[in-house]
Structures are given as C-alpha cells and as structure tokens.
Image (cartoon, grey):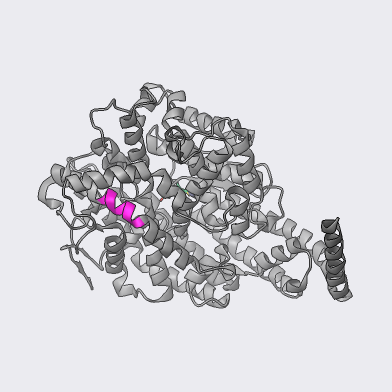
Amino acid sequence: MLNMLRSLLLLVVFCFLTCSCSDPEIEEEEINARAFMDILNAETGEDINLLSNLEWDYATNLTDANLKRKTQFAADMSVRVKVRWEEVMKYNWKAFSDPTLKRQFMLYSLLGDAALSKDEIVSLHRIIGDMSKIYSTAKICDYSDKTQCNLSLEPDIVEIHANSRDEAELKHVWVSWRDAVGPHIRNMYRDYVHLLNKTAHLNHFKSADELWLFEYEEFNMKSLKGQIRTLWEQVKPLYQQLHAYVRHGLRKRYGSIVSENGPIPAHLLGNVWSQSWANLADDFKPFPNAAEQDITKNLKKQNYTVEKIFRTAEDFFTSIGLPKMVDLFWKKSIFTKPSDRNIICHASAWEFQDGEDFRIKMCTKVTEENFNTVHHEMGHIEYYMLFKDLPLPFRRGANPGFHEAVGDLVSLSVKSPKHLKKLNLFDARLDDPELMLNNLFEIGMTKLPLLPFSYMVDQWRWGVFSGKIPFDDYNCKWWELRQELQGLEPPVPRSEADFDPGSKYHIPSSTPYVRYFVAIILQFQFHRAACEKAGQYDRNNPHKLLHLCDIYQNKAAGTAIRQMLSLGASKPWPEALYTMTGQHVMDASALLEYFRPLQTWLEKKNRENNVHVGWEKSTKTCTKGK
Ligand code: X8Z
Ligand code: ZN
C-alpha cells in the first residue's frame, strides 16, 4: 500500500515536471521535425544505396572508370548532404523530449566529409581509391625463381607466410611485399592526412583522430584512448607470457637471429603483419605428442568446400535463432577470387540500405584462418539484418567494435572442442586435458597478438593525424610502436624510404583499426554472458569453464544476442552492452578468465625454461631520411 502511494506520488511529480516544462513551440517543432526526419532518412538511404553500389563496383573491378563514377557520385552527393545538414542544424533538437528523435538529430549533426569542397572530396576519394588499388594489385617475385614475378598477397604471400619455415624465403617475401606497396603510396598518404585533418577542422575537431572517435560517443564517458590504455595494461602480462614462450621456440628453430631477450623478428610469425600467430600453433603447441588437431588439414580431409564453410557458418547463426542468409546474399556475394579482373581481396561485408541486399566479398580458401573469417563476415551480415528496420542513423553497430565482435563471438563456440567434434574437425576424446590446452593455445595464438597490433595501428594513426608523428618520422615511429607494444623488430634495417604502415590494408583503405581491439575485449564479455544464459558457465566447475562452452542451438543465448544486435546504435553503446552482459563498461576479466588455464601453463613453462619475459631494446635500426 505504501509502495502504491509512493508510486502515485512519483507519477504526479513526473507529470508535473514533464507537462509543465514542455514548451508548446518546441512541441510543435518536434512534430515538424519528425516529418522532416522521415524524409531525410528516405533521401539519405537512397543516396547511400547508390553510393554503396558504385563502391561495390569498384571494389570488385578496380578500373579507373569505376573509380571515377564512384568519386563523382560521392562529390555530387556531398552537396545534397550539406543542404540536408543545414536543415538539420536549424532545429532546436537538443531541447526535444523524444529521445529517439533527439538521438537521430545528434547523429546527423556530424557533417563529416561533406564539409569539404567538391574538388576536395574528389581528391580524397581518388587518393583512397588509388592507394587501395596499389595495395590490392601489388605483385612480388618468387624466392626460388626470381623470373616469376606474379605473386599476389592473396593467396600467394599469405600462404608462404603461413607455411614456409625457410627464414631466407620469409625474409624475401616480407621485404618484397613492403617494397611493392609502401614507397608507392607514401606521398599520397601525406596528402590524405592533410585532407582528413581538414575535414576534422571543418567539423570542429582538433584533428582526424577525434573525428574518428566520434562513433564511440566519448562525450558521455572516459576517453576511449584512456579506456584502451587501461584494458591493454590488464591483458599485457598474458601477451608477454605468450611472446616469451614463442620467442623461445623460434630461437630454438632459427638460432641467433632470434635474440634471447629482445623483440621477435616480424617475418617469422606465420602472418604477413604478425597480427595472428595461429599458423605457428601446431609448431609450438603445449603438448606436441597429443593427437594432432590441425583444423586446416581436417577441413580438407572432410571435403569442406568454400560453399560448405559458408553454409556451416549460417547453420550456427540460425541454430541460435538468428536470421538465415537471404537469396540475394547467395546470388550477389563473391566468395572466390575472380581471374578475369582485379578486385580488393580483403574480406568485407556489405549492406545497401534497402532491407534486402546484403553481400560478402572474399577470396576464400579452405583454411582455418578463412573458416574464422567467414564467421566474422557473416556476423556483420547478421547485424545488418537485425537492425535493418530501425531509422537509418541507428543502422550501425552500437560502436564499431560491437560490429567486429559478432562473428568472433560465435567463433568462440565454434572453436570449442565440443563443437569442432560435431563438425568432424576434431577427432579425439573430449576429456583429454592436453588436447583442451592445445586447443586453447591455438585460440590464444589467434586472438592475443591482435590486441597490441590493433592498438598499435591506431596509436600510430592518432599520432600522425594529431601531428605528433611528422611525415619524416612516419616509418621509424611505426617501428618504435611495433617494438614497444608488440615486442617485434623488422628482419632488416628500415628507413624513411620505406612506408611499412602502407603494407596493411586498413591504412591505404582508410579503415579505423582500434575497433578490433574493442572487439576482442567485447567478444569475451559477450561469450561469458551468452554461456551464463545457456547454463554452461560456472567458474567453479572444471567442466563448465568459459573455453569449453558452446552455445550452438541455445535459444536463450541467441535471444540475448538478438536483442543486443536489434538495438543497433539506437542507444549509447554502454546500454547495449548492459542489455547483454549486465555491465556498462568494457572489461578484460572475461578474456583473462577464458585464457586462465593457458596463462597458468605459460607462466610455469617460461619459469621452467628460465625464459626472460618482456623484451629489451632492438638492435635493428631505422634511419631517418632516405
Ligand atoms: O579486416 C578484418 C576483417 C574485415 S572487417 C576481415 N579483420 C582485421 C584484419 O584482417 O586485419 C578481422 C581481424 C582483424
Ligand atoms: Zn569485420
């Protein structure tokens, strides 16, 4: 009774506050604003649809004519965007009472690159288009047959890094790939930075790093840079243990070119950028005598085709109640590399703002790495499909890291031994602790090196954008950060004639990278929440630890994921995080808990081997000037 009275009183106070404060003029403006927003969303959606189609045309056929069409359209569109934005800014939207409407206005209040002149937009799009083309079409010569000079990044260079254990060959490929891209785009990159900073200034930001961080809505919280720094400090000891263990193994294999206490040479880690070390997992697994569980080999043995990998991924998503891929997806996606034209092979997932057209573009091979990437890309498509009916400004991830985390979240279950066994990709007993640890090690080798790498890439770019890293220090600062954060060194001395950042896709294509750091932290938070809902997680029960959980066919976990994804960006991201996890902040404890058995094992092993943990300064130099 007392409670009822209190509720009644609260209701009266609430009505008094909201009704008496509302201003009839604002109320009327809000009604008009709603009608305006409907038109704005429809017109903007049409423009984005056309632009996305032209972008797809270029990405899947890198001709000058296609770049011109896309660039011209973007420039023309920017005029319309600016006119619409000027209308947006006439509204007193900060005073609106409808939070949904207010938030749409807030998201439209960033003009973005439409603040530039048409000519500048043409230049910006042309530079990014040209840099991406140089990256995507670069070729290098074969190591043993130097007359054969048609090796491309995907598949050749990627495969050599994955499979070769010949140090000289690896060095040749590593250096050649950087020679084939970096120097050709170095000067273009300076012009690009200038235009991006100009965009930032016109949008009232100090530099482009602030513009890029707008999507994280920092104005509501501690700066994202600060959050990342704290999270990195928490996971760093685990990374250092893995680093020390792998360096020890590499030194045994390659001898003194791998120093005992220094950074690891970057060409030996099974990956062009050393961002995943998964291709060395089999070489250094904790229990080498346990039955072999090489997923790439098993995929081939079980006759997995590219199509079967996509169908397998789809089956997982639908098993937890998420939507299946639509017919158009299967018709319009590109799953393998065409031989009759140049395309951007780097995998991506596309939406076209029409509610039915969703596509993946990928030069897929039947490997474990690509098996993960297919799940990753399909996660993007699931997100697109689940928020497709929201008002246009909300059709994006709660923040970019959420978008990157969806497919990876599912992969955490797919890669559990229990699930791999279901897929015939694991053929041993599930109660063998050695195999469980080998499996966890493989996942650690995939995920953990991406943490410092993703942090490093955008720390470098933030420095470049803000002017802390000047043009004549671009490459040396890149290596300083590579050393400091990843504990890596180049296999040969570097100089400012090189431009090694350019050899990583996201630099020429102007794609922000810290989102992958955020995604790694989040996916474990999501996984813990999903496994809890599935009744498969109990930190005190050795059979219910996080790394053993598989949410396949679990509707309770699926419903929670669905709810979070269906929110899109309609709320600030901490709220989306809360709906799924009951937490408002990013938190590394789930990741650390997931890898606890691995960390314990690594610490013991490094102690036994008397291995130095951490790294001293590299002896490899980077020379300023050319
Ligand atoms: O770029 C990607 C995806 C597309 S969003 C294939 N990833 C990063 C990379 O390849 O560098 C996924 C992991 C990190
Ligand atoms: Zn992605």
Figure check: 201 above or below 257: below
Figure check: 36 above or below 581: below
Q: Main secondary structure of the magenta part?
A: helix
Residue at 85% of width from left, 73% of height from top?
Answer: 22
Figure check: 611 above or below 213: above
Corner quadrant of residue 491: bottom left
Q: Nearer the viewer, residue 151 or 28?
A: 28
Q: Position of residue 430 (x, y in %)?
A: 39, 25
Can the viewer see residue 47? no
For the magenta stretch, what is the residue range?
236-243
Q: Is residue 176 left or right of residue 16?
A: left
Q: Nearer the viewer, residue 524 or 58?
A: 524
Q: Is residue 69 magenta?
A: no
Corner quadrant of residue 497: bottom left
Q: Position of residue 353 (x, y in %)?
A: 66, 50
Figure check: 118 above or below 265: below
Q: Position of residue 519 (x, y in %)?
A: 48, 52
Quarter occupied by the N terminus: bottom right
Residue at 44% of width from left, 55% of height from top?
Answer: 517
Q: Position of residue 253 (x, y in %)?
A: 15, 42
Can the viewer see residue 128? yes
Q: Is residue 413 left or right of residue 21?
A: left
Residue at 45% of width from left, 57% of height from top?
Answer: 509
